[in-house]
Amino acid sequence: MDALHQRKDALSWGRAHHFTHHIAQPAFADELPTILKERGARPVLARGLGRSYGDSGLNADNVLIDMRALDHVRGFNPDTGVLDAEAGVTLKDILELCAQYEGRWFLPVTPGTKFVTLGGAIANDVHGKNHHGAGCFGNHVLSLRLMRSDGTVLTCSPDENTALFRATVGGMGLTGLILSARIALKSVPGLWVENEDIRYDTLDEFYALTNDSLEGWEYTVAWIDCLARGQATGRGIFSRSRHIASSRPAPPIRDPRIALPVNLPNIALNKITMAAFNALYIRRARRKPTRKAVPFDGAFYPLDAIGQFNRLYGRRGFYQYQCVIPTRVERDATRALLSEISQAGVGSFLAVLKTFGDKLSPGLMSFPMPGTTLALDFANAGASTLALLSRLDAITRAAGGRIYAAKDGRVSAADFQAGYPQWTDFARLIDPGFSSSFWRRVGAGAAA
């Protein structure tokens, strides 16, 4: 298999999983049929920039196809905002294109990093701070080109090969290779945003701020102090922002300003350092907010300023836990999750709370549902970390919620399937030549 190279350096963003892969790095799309033939009996999976946190983007002992070189813009209509691009184009590339057109267009939905490929954004059906108004990334995909393991290329859209389109959006790369896609960018008054940071003290205040912000603000999210207890459970800083017109030049689209060259010692993240950070960080926001115009990069992608920030969690890596709790029980279940975390005395500097709207994605396996989503990082301390995450799973499952596959690296098959009752319909649409470590853990055996 001349096109494949055995390597051990393909890691997920959480760096907690270490596998051997056979990796192909095509420079052009016409190399893909040969790679698919040379894989032999090994299943394949596409790989972008490796920003999935767990094992959904890994394929232990099997084939990964690195799609980053397939990064050409095939066409862009500045009058309609319709972009046609290969799967390896990054969100940063798209933002740079937007800046060339006087900032009249912007990503319809963006996650918390711009270092994600277009194919990855579709395969994980990413969501952002504007879900309550815009839905998921998949809501803005007009069509995509999909190569199956036999080399067949299909055009999939809401009107053509519809079932396969729905399985591919949010399908974790299991239905085939996304070659390219047509997406609808959104019209904006400019690339600057008006922003407010509001300090609040209780979980009820978070929900009040959220409800007050749904109509007038495009983007909403809260940082929370995950160690707070009692009446202070859920306290944090609520941020809301919206695009504005500005006479200032378009803000720069930055690469990381600094980078962590090595893993920090595991002892660097502990209850004492986190408590100190949280106490200082929450004081940065005033109780009476002030509005200010800021570049979109700082408002949407603060962590992009630090290259390889995932090394903060040490050599053993970390797990991110992201779940969504349905509206009917969101307050009680979210409080239960936060209480469990604070009692354990662990968590992260990066704890995010947000509500999802009711705009449904076309994706069969899309993560969001109307309700509240909570996302936190946990340094990998071994059995104690996994035990805590299992307790969080139990709360999520009892509430009728589910976890986000793009962030997961350890959920049980039973808990995953309970959160995605449509998983059996999805399993029938998976290409038999594709697989992942995640899918073999949560679905492949039962589906067979």
Image (cartoon, rainbow, N blue to C red):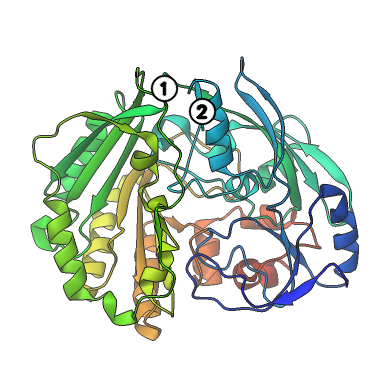
Quarter of the image with the N terminus is bottom right
Quick check: can you spot residue 91? yes
Residue nearest the observer in this picture, 236 or 373? 236
Q: Residue at x 76, y 53 (%)?
A: 176
Q: Regarding mark 1 in the picture, which secondary structure is present there?
A: loop
Amino acid type at image mark 1? Gly
- Residue 165: give x, y in percent of width and height: 71, 41
Report whether 115 appears left or right of 395: right
- Residue 273: give x, y in percent of width and height: 19, 71
For marks 1 and 2, the one nearer the N-term is 2
- Residue 304: give x, y in percent of width and height: 42, 51
Q: Nearer the viewer, mark 1 or mark 2?
A: 2
Q: Is residue 219 above or below residue 36?
A: above
Report whether 5 appears left or right of 446: right
Residue nearest the observer in this picture, 366 or 142? 142
Q: Which mark is residue 328?
A: none
Q: Residue at x 33, y 80 (%)?
A: 266
Residue nearest the observer in this picture, 388 or 427? 388
Q: Which mark is residue 99?
A: 2
Amino acid type at image mark 2? Ala
Tell me the residue that label 1 is attached to. 190
